[in-house]
Amino acid sequence: MPDIEIVKLKLRRGTDAQRQTVTLEQGELGYTTDGKRVWVGDGFTIGGNTVGTITHPPLSINTRTDLTTAATGDVVYEDSLLYQLSGTDATVLSAWGFIGSRVDGDTIEYDANNNLHVISQAISASNLNPNVIATNGGLALNPTQGLSANVDNTSITVSNTGQLSVIGGSISSSNVGNGLSGGSGNLLGVDTTSSFTFTGTKLEIANAPVNTVCACAINPATVTGGLEINGSSLQMVTIGGGTVHPLDTSEYDSKGRVISKATTITQNVSGTDTSGAGATFYGSIIDTLRTNHTLVCATSSNSDQSSTITAVLTSAGFITFESGTCGNLAIPVFKY
């Protein structure tokens, strides 16, 4: 079996500053201990030529000149922009060339954060591709004048003020819907019944059809004369209330309503003695004790006289009342 030899190959090494003072022989390799780069000599270039390029980690603004060990061809991403060292001295700012996207400055530019963006109001008609107009989209593109409505100038046109306008023609009456009238050469208007009228150019109610207006539509301030609104109905205002008794007199207003009542009994008189003819009519309707009164036994029965009871009546004098046309009358009365 052949002998296997393991060779440990070590390159010429030193700092990058030392490298820049040495001319490496042709094919000779050198390693910089601080820059961690490999260089190869050509026999006449001081420091040799770098073997490959390096893409350095991203940097903040204007710090690429700190890359003292950078070699020609190295690339660095600084503040969102891409630079390449085209010179030999990385500490000189002008030795770095910008290799990012180029902009025209008229339509596209970098903003403050080095992001590409379209410049406001920079896109003109000449920048638009005709393909931006959809087929049958109703738009047209003039490379000089820009976008416009695509009109036939027969039925629709663009006025001098830039507004769409219908050319001639009229609306067919068959296209006029509910609530309107006219068309086919006639002026359009509101289709109304005789319940409406026009005052000048304003539509107003002339009269209300029968059974169409409820009381709730009436202004309460206009309801007077003893009337009031109750929900959807009109009714007379309620005055007083209660039962009218046979010997009461009632007072009526002009609407025939009872507004007050009073008894027609003007006074109660009594017989003056407790014997003779006067005893029969002795007493008063307000008496609660019976003394020297005349007692009368009376029989009360139901309507078919199948049942009767005996009631004791006591004299209560006379009641005097106004009869109207017959004057004042006095009637003897008895109480239970």
Image (cartoon, rainbow, N blue to C red):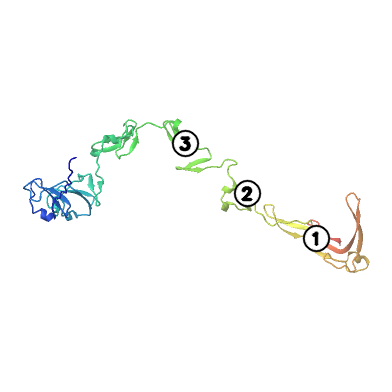
Closest to the observer: 144 or 44? 44
- The amino acid marked with disc number 1 is Phe
Label 3 sits on residue: 180
Question: Of marks 2 and 3, which one's residue comes earlier in the chain?
Answer: 3
Q: Are marks 1 and 2 in contact (CB under 8 Å)?
A: no
Q: What element carries label 3?
A: strand
Report whether 241 appears left or right of 207. right
Q: How crowded is mark 2: few (under 14 residues within 10 Å), some or many (20 or more)?
A: some
Amino acid bearing label 3: Leu
Q: In this view, does 38 lie to the left or right of 251?
A: left
Quarter of the image with the C terminus in it: bottom right
- SS of the residue at dot 1? strand
The structure residue drawn at horizontal position 80% and vertical position 64%, both measured from the top left corner, is: 267
Q: Residue at x 80, y 60 (%)?
A: 321
Residue shown at the point (91%, 52%) measured from the top left: 307
**x, y percent for residue 35:** 17, 53
Indicate the quadrant containing the N terminus: top left, top right, bottom left or bottom right. Answer: top left
CA gap, disc 1 and disc 2? 40 Å
Specify the label residue 321 is tagged with. 1
Residue toward you, 151 or 325: 151
Q: Which amino acid does label 2 sit on?
A: Leu
How many angstroms separate mark 2 from mark 3 (CA)? Answer: 36 Å
Q: Residues within 10 Å of mark 1 (few under 14, many from 20)?
A: some
Please state the horizontal and vertical placement of residue 58, each as a whole percent of the image: 23, 51
Observer-nearest of 109 and 315 = 109
Q: Mark 2 points at which residue?
A: 234
